[in-house]
Image: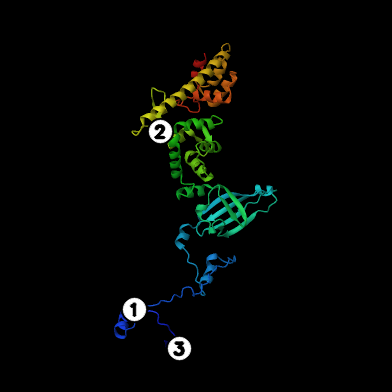
Amino acid sequence: MNIFGRDLLICDCDEFTRNFMTDNFGMEYDGHTISLEDERPIPPEREIPPYTGFGSEEDSLGSFYSLVPKPPIQNWAHYFENDKKILRFVSQLDTSSPEDRERMFIISYYLADDTIAVYEPPARNSGFMGGTFMERSRSKNPENHEFYTPKDMMVGARMEFRKHFFILIEADEYTLNFMSNKKFPGSDVTAIVEKLKNKFREQSVLIRDTFRRVDEDHSGTLNMHEFKGALKKFNFDVSDQELISIMRKFDPNGDGEIRYDEFCASVLDEDHKGVDHRESGQIMHGTSVYKNPEVERQKSQMAQQAQDDRNAQIEAILERSRKMVANVDCSEAFMEADTKDDGHCSYEAFAALLQRMGLGLSDPEMEIMMEAFYDPDHADQTRPMSIHVLDEALF
């Protein structure tokens, strides 16, 4: 049919029309629908042009989406809530260039509008003038092509600005407090401690012993390096930000050291703190009603065997030491170590005493002796080594 100068093909009709044509005109028609999907042209994709750098990226996109661009919508509530709140980090360039390794930068994140500024403090005789490295602006993460957010900022993070890579190495006190209060990744100390509890719950018997082994200076405390090494022995790798959060929680006086007895008391659950001495010599931490008798018997035998082997090693070391000091007067050495006349001394004094006696102990034997004469119940844990028990064992 030609309608208004256009040829139209009737290809189908509804049920009523089909029945009417059949009953009145004897015309049967099954219909023949024509699909035009394949003939339709594919609409072109709208490619967003690259950002020119003039103005904000949101403002530039307005002229792309509409011929009459509208100003970008500002979140004024967010702006006024975070006005004058700035997260500041100290950073270094991640480069192999020796002249750039010592350069220090201050990276400031402005929470009000999510902009970032990079400033290099002038340093004398550095060869660099210092000053503004990147003016305050929004920056994108090249990995996901999204703008950096506050939660991307953490100690140890690697960030790119102006085709240069930076490693955040330090944060000021305000920044650390803000990140901790807002539960930023790596700063939620509650979640970190909970993960430590879950990890230590599996190896609760070895925790204190491992910490004592890592304590290189035998001071009863662990610095940041020693503490990170202790956590690695439990296959618990922490980021730099998580390590700082742990140190801030368990180092309230800020001297950079954690007393591992206090740390274990805080991290270990109550059922792991209780110690039940059984006749077999096995130390069981906590109780459980769901125990396999056969498994428990095997564990008891293994623990008993390990304890017997340990006792045999200690007795062999003591027997050899008794022969070496049988005709030696060690009273002066013992008196020098026992400065408070309470039968105890520090780790350093105990190690010095063993060396002064000339026992010729190897490093593994020294560790066994340090563990054997450690007194966990002594009131002063800076002097936990019992030289009184050593005196009785040798003489």
Between label 2 and label 3, give the one nearer the viewer. 3
Residue matched to label 2: 272
Q: Residue at x 56, y 38 (%)?
A: 225
Residue 286, image quadrant: top left
Q: Residue furthest top?
A: 327
Q: Which residue is mark 1?
A: 14
Q: Vertical placement of 14 versus 254: above or below? A: below
Is label 1 or label 2 in front?
1
Give the residue drawn at x 40%, y 33%: 272
**Going 44% across and 36% down the picture, which residue do you hit?**
202
Q: Secondary structure at mark 3?
A: loop
Q: Nearer the viewer, residue 110 or 35?
A: 35
The amino acid pointed to by label 3 is: Gly
The three-letter amino acid code for the residue at tag 2 is His
Q: Position of residue 119 (x, y in %)?
A: 61, 54
The residue at which mark 3 appears reads as: 5
Q: Earlier in the sequence, mark 2 or mark 3?
A: 3
> Is disc 1 placed on a helix, strand or loop?
loop
Q: CA distance from mark 2 to mark 3?
A: 92 Å
- Residue type, mark 1 in image: Asp
Left or right: 27 in relation to 103 = left
Q: Is residue 149 visible?
A: yes
Q: Quadrant of the N terminus?
A: bottom left
Residue 70 position (above or below residue 151): below
Disc with the residue nearer the chain's start (1 vs 2): 1
